[in-house]
Structures are given as C-alpha cells and as structure tokens.
Amino acid sequence: MPRPAADLHVLRLCSVFEPPEARRRAGPGALPGELDSRAARFDPIGGMQNHTATLTRCLDSQGVRQTVVTARLAGPRGTTPLGRAARVHRTGLPLPRLRQLWALAGLSAVLRAGRQAPVDVVHAHQGEDLATLLLGRLAARVHRCPLVVTLHCSVGHTLTGRGPRVRLLRALGGWVERGALRRADAVVVLTTRTAAAVRDDGVPADRVSTIPSGFDPALFAGSPADVFPGVARPRIGYVGRLAPQKSPGTLVEAFGRMREEAALVVVGDGPDRALVHRLAATSPAAGRITLAGFVEHARVPAVLGSLDVLVLPSAYEEMGSVLTEAMAAGLPVVASRVGGIPEVVRHGDTGLLVPPGDADALAAALDEVAGDPALRARLAAGARARAVHYSWPALAARVADVYDRVLGVPAVEQAAA
C-alpha cells in the first residue's frame, strides 16, 4: 500500500550540499569572509548547495524522513543531523580533480540507508556530476524503489565552453544524462526550456515536472541593518560563487567602463577569486569596488537588502537561484540572456538582460539602471510581485507531490496527507 508523503523515507543523493560550517582562511592577509584555499577550489557554496539543503529542511518540517549522501568536498567526513529527522552523510576524498569518487565512497551509506526504515524514493540531484546519476540508478535498484532526478544543470543542453573538459562532459555526459533520465520514474527540471529539451530527448512528458529553485521566506522577514554602511549608493552587487560559469570578471570589467557614478560590491569566493581581485585592483574604478568575500547563506538576505541592483553575468546558467532571492529582496536584476535566466528575469519588467560575455553591453545596462532611480523603483516593484511564485515551502510541497505520484498515491490521499 503506498504511503503518503508525510511517512516517506527519501534517499537524497547530491555531489554538493550545504557544508556543516564555512571554512574560513585565517592569519595575516586574510580578507573578511575569505574561504581557505581548499574550500575555494571546491566551490563549496552555491545555488545547488542551497537548493538541496533548503528542500531538505522544508520536507523535514513536513514530516518527511530523509537520508542525504553527499561529497565531503573540503570539509570533514562524517554524519550530522539536520532538522528533526534528516541525516547528512558526507563522504569521498578531498581531491578537486577526482571529486566524482565521492560516489564510490558513498556506496556504503547508500546501502545502509534502508536499515532503520525502508527507502521509498531515491532522489538524485545532478549538476555537472555524472556520478550522481549512476549512483542514483544503482540505489533505486538496490532499494527497489522509484528514482526521481532533479536536473540542476543539463550537461547536454546548458553547459557551454570550448575546453577539453567541457567537450568531454557534453559528449559523454550528454549520453549518460539522456540514458539516466529516460529510465527515471520522474524528472524535475528548473525551467520550461530544459523541460522541452528532455522531452525532445525521449523522456515522456508525463514524467517531467518543472519546479524552479526558490527563496526561504523566513530568511527575508524583517528589515535587516545595512551591511555596507560605508559604501556609497547606488550599489551594484554580485552574490555567488567566483567561478568561470558565473563570469564575475566580466562584471568587474564592465563596472570599470560605466559612465554613471556607482559602487560595486562583490560577495563570494571560489576559484576565480585571484582573477577578480586582479581585475578589481587594476580597474579605473578600483576605489569604488568592495570585495566582501564569502558570507553564510543565512546572511544573504541582509546583503541583498543592502544593495540597489543585483548582477548575474553568467556564461551559462540553468536558472540562477540568487535571482529569486534578489526579487524577494525587491532588487532589480541585470543578467545574461542565457539558459533559463529569461524565464526568471523578465526584461523591462523585473530587470534587464544582456548578451553573455559582452562587457560593453553590461556596462550600458548598468548605466541605465544606475542613472535612473525611477526605473530602479519600477523594476524593484515588478521583482517583488514576481517573487511570490518562488516561495520554497510551496515548491517543496510540489516536490512531495512528485514523490506521491511515482509511488502511485491517489490524489485524494495526497490531499488527506
């Protein structure tokens, strides 16, 4: 007899997850909020990490039992509790070039997951990590239960670039991705663009659900104090990983080409940290650039509330969860017209869209919003109105509905649960 969502045991597999605590660099020369070099190389904080952690918390509050198996990345190996009933197993080797080996190390945790309670659903979260799909298929077979896959970044349809790693991922990864998604009992995508792509790849339409990333309303309650009291306005901000995918260097270059007087605040850490610092130091607007380093996710609402514009200059992007958080904070957004971003940021309504990698076009858009307070106010109002569609508790309930559907729980029973 199928069990309702509140009695579920979900085995969640993800190569990245919110770390137990931020790993900060200490000592002479350390910047505020700077991660240590190992943590920065591993990109331990980003949208997928926050997505998987917030979804786990929301479902935990709804009474869903969850076992999370994830990579240790630069943090310690071990098992920690999360919420009332979730357990997070961090495993693998702290080797940046062999990070996919976490899946092999996680096999024992996957096999043990059903000892205390049978696993009802395996939910694999795939970014650019093909090992998660293979581990998910194995886990579903071992526990004889349905497999749900959330596609955070389609290596076959979203990943772009010219390097050998990208070419290998698109060729081999696209093949692995297509095969795994066709065999999954349900596929969750973040945007309608990706939904159409996976349907074209042969995934039946009735197995595909579009459920975006969102924001936690509890984090955005109240009016936080100004995080950057010494920084002049208007403030243009970047919040996220300093990584090639996000192209933060393009923003620093564009800021140096602006005609309007403004301040730039860069919040985040990652493998492009040295590049961003070098570009900032040599920028003609160096005196108006603040490099704030990494901040805990719980502080992001206060950071966003202290800005006037958010910029996401990604080279490629499935969706960009910081966009929904920016809209919840009432921020107009300037972002690249790539991937699923146009589904979140409506040009002229909630923000402005520019071609990826075009520093001149980005500078022109920033000049437009920085020099026009009325435009910023109109875009901010549009952003707040659109944010209501991205509340995490409601999105998590939709994920629970997917679990019920693959288990064959009738709609009337779902309502009663």
Image (cartoon, rainbow, N blue to C red):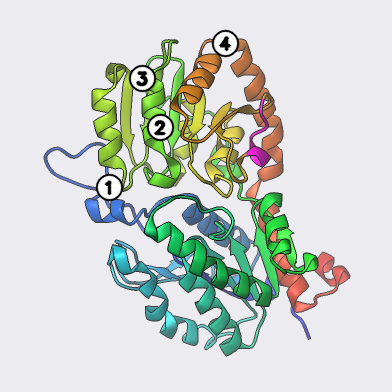
Label 2: which secondary element: helix
Does the magenta portion include 24?
no
Name the amino acid type tagged 4.
Asp
Residue 149 visible within the image = yes
| Residue 282: percent from left, percent from top | 24, 24
The earlier-in-sequence mark between 3 and 2 is 2
Give the label on residue 250, or none.
2
Location of mark 3 (residue): 256
Disc 3 residue crowd, few under 14, some 14–19, many 20+, Cα 10 Å = many
Q: Is residue 86 left or right of residue 252?
A: right
Residue segment shown in magenta: 342-347
> Tags 1 and 3 in contact by the CB under 8 Å rule?
no
What amino acid type is highlighted by mark number 1? Leu
The amino acid marked with disc number 2 is Thr
Residue neighbourhood size for the residue with mark 4, other residues' Cα within 10 Å, grouped as few (<14), some (14–19), many (≥20)? few
Q: Which residue is mark 1?
A: 35
**Which mark is in front, 2 or 1?**
2
Q: Is residue 343 magenta?
A: yes
Seen in the picture, residue 24 relative to 346 is either above or below; the reply is: below
Q: Secondary structure at mark 3?
A: helix
Residue assigned mark 4: 372
Q: Residue furthest left?
A: 28
Q: Nearer the viewer, mark 2 or mark 4?
A: 2
Q: What's the residue at 58%, 43% (across, down)? A: 218
Q: Is residue 61 left or right of residue 270?
A: right
Look at the image and tell me whether residue 86 can be seen: no
Q: Name the front one of labels 4 and 1.
A: 4
Q: Position of residue 187 (x, y in %)?
A: 67, 66
